[in-house]
Amino acid sequence: MLTVSGLKRLHLSVSFDLQDGECVALQGPSGVGKTLLLRSIADLDPNEGTVKLDGVLREAIPAPAWRRRVTYLAAEPGWWSDAVQEHFAAWEEALPLVMRLGLPVDCGPWSIQRLSTGERLRLGLARALMLRSRVLLLDEPTSALDPAAASAVEALIAERISDGTSVLWSTHDRAQARRVGSRIFAMRSDGGIEESWP
């Protein structure tokens, strides 16, 4: 279980628990702080408060190990090499995920420059899923995708949830929030959250 208590970053101030195998959808207008919240939980930005995984304080776990267990997928994933496959520790192992997300088997040598925004987003998701994290923090993972690709992403994440992965999923799509989330957090302009059920 992920426990967030008194997490503060700029105007944010939130507390909640995320159970194993639970998906909570995060809603709210642009600029309200959804990305800030996800990045703060992943410890990518300075923040105050207490974050625990299975009762273990985030500070007790080296940052790289924490981010492998509590993985943040940015709305625009980062790339540091030219070829797609160079961003994966084990490209051959990643291929089944890549293909399920609708990308061709021969996309490994492709240059990152030739990818569409949607292709980058799906490859970033495949890269994150390869870590087999305990918690996934997803920042608009289907925002640039067509309905078929978005459906493939939802199905893949649903499988991980059924295997016990916890997910905090930021989305502007209310219908998607109701589909994927067992609970919905609506972020307020004052930096707090209101919980509702789909």
Image (spheres, rainbow, N blue to C red):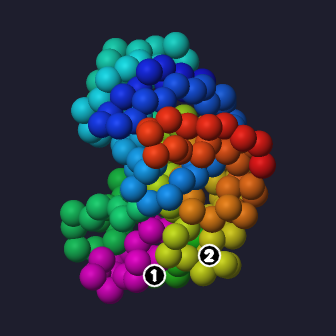
Q: Mark 1 points at which residue?
A: 106
Across and down, in percent, residue 188 comes to 52, 44
Q: Which of 99 and 162 lies nearest the eye of the viewer?
A: 162
At a point 75% along the width and 57% down the height, the residue shown is 179
At a point 25% along the width and 32% down the height, the residue shown is 46
| Count of number-bearing discs | 2
At a point 44% along the width and 21% down the height, the residue shown is 6
Left or right relative to 144: residue 184: right
Highlighted range, magenta: 107-130
Amino acid type indicated by mark 1: Asp
Left or right relative to 108: residue 176: right
Left or right relative to 137: residue 31: left
Q: Could you say which quadrant of the image residue 178 lies in?
A: bottom right
Q: Is residue 112 inside the magenta stretch?
A: yes
Q: Is residue 170 inside the magenta stretch?
A: no
Across and down, in percent, residue 130 comes to 48, 51
In primary-sequence order, the first of circles 1 and 2 is 1
Amino acid type indicated by mark 2: Ala
At a point 50% along the width and 35% down the height, the residue shown is 192
Q: Name the residue under label 2.
A: 149
